[in-house]
Image (tube, rainbow, N blue to C red):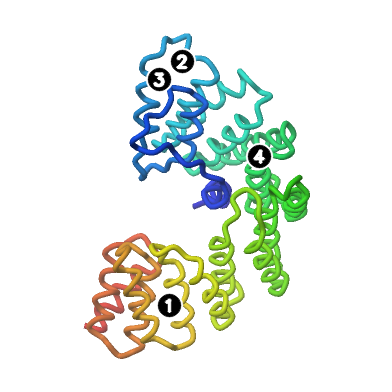
Amino acid sequence: MSRLAQVSAGLAFWLVLVPCAAASEPLPKDPAVLAKALSAVSSSTPSDAVGEAKRALGSLSSKERGEARWLFVEAMLDRVERDWKAMRDVMERLVALEPTRAEYQFWYGNSIFNGIDDLGVFSKMSSAKKGRDAYAEAVRLDPNHVDARVALAQFYSEAPRVVGGSVEKTREQAQALLALPGGRGAFQGRMLLARLAAKDKDWAEMSRQYQAAEAAGGEGANPAAALASHAYALLRQKEDPAASLPVLDRYDRVAKPDDTWPAFCRGEAYRALGRHREAVDLYTKVLAANPGALNTRWGIAESLEALGDRKAAAAHYAEFAKRFPKDDRAAKARGRAEKLQ
């Protein structure tokens, strides 16, 4: 994934999702309700909103379908179906019709970044600037729009300087989020500041900001997300597995029963510390829930090899190469599997 596409890829973590209506309760044929429900639906999650939106759009006259409120429903449906070009085309029409709606500008920016990896190099650069400008316009129109500020900050943080990337501007957006009335941007602002501190390798400040995010309120406030990011940054960026363990202890207390991320992170920490038997037990738990967990598959193979279990290690290396042939480690996995058999 390109650095430009990471701007939109990261949004899934930050955006506030709006619960859909229960399956037993028909959704009203209100375009605003449908669009809001669709904005919270993923392509892999069934929802009554999808079928309701298709039926509603299909019953409209061409004149009605060209109204802004229904174009927004159509764009959100394209988002669910991951038809990024169609979504962008519709959003371009929409912001032309109603250029002063911050929400439309925000989703126009999202539509650009969602499909940016399908473009050529020069088209990527021009599109990235359009996406940045859409987010900036959303913030200008509504300075309290948390998602738009987060998206703009993500752009400044991840984009190359040639298209406007800037640490200083990322920090400005983070501070602006902290200053929003009612603390509505507190969580998102703290998370951004933690990421900036990690880039600067200021580990004490990183931990301070992540801990503040754990306790923060505001839109999208999520202590588990703060803990997950904190633990992973300690593991991968600081490369301090021992420091991640107390964070994972706190994470375990708030994680949902089906959340395998704490087990994966603890397995990674134990593997780095040479505690391979404990790592294998945790990796096994993760793979039972998700056999397609790429890094877990690699981790268990390495830990089993370290424990001297050649047969089991070879099987996992072979499975890794089979499942993930395009991964940079696939050739190494095949070689290790052959050597250990």
Which residue is at a point 43% across and 71% down the rendered structure image?
264
First in sequence: mark 1 vs mark 2: 2
Please determine whether, in this image, residue 265 is positioned above or below residue 180. below
Q: What is the C-alpha distance between the residues marked 4 and 1?
A: 38 Å
* Amino acid bearing label 2: Arg
Residue 282 % position (x, y) = 37, 77
Name the element at disc 2. Answer: helix
Residue 57 % position (x, y) = 40, 20
First in sequence: mark 4 vs mark 1: 4
Name the element at disc 4. Answer: helix
Which residue is at a point 59% across and 50% down the rendered structure image?
220
Relative to 336, 234 lies left or right: right
Residue 5 % position (x, y) = 54, 47
Disc 2 marks which residue? 65
* Amino acid bearing label 1: Gly
Relative to 291, 201 lies left or right: right
Q: What is the C-alpha distance between the residues marked 3 and 4?
A: 30 Å
Of residues 158 and 209, which is closer to you in this image? 209
The extreme front residue here reads: 25
Disc 4 marks which residue? 132
Q: Which mark is residue 57?
A: 3
Q: Mark 2 touching mark 3, by CB under 8 A?
A: yes
Relative to 325, 42 lies left or right: right
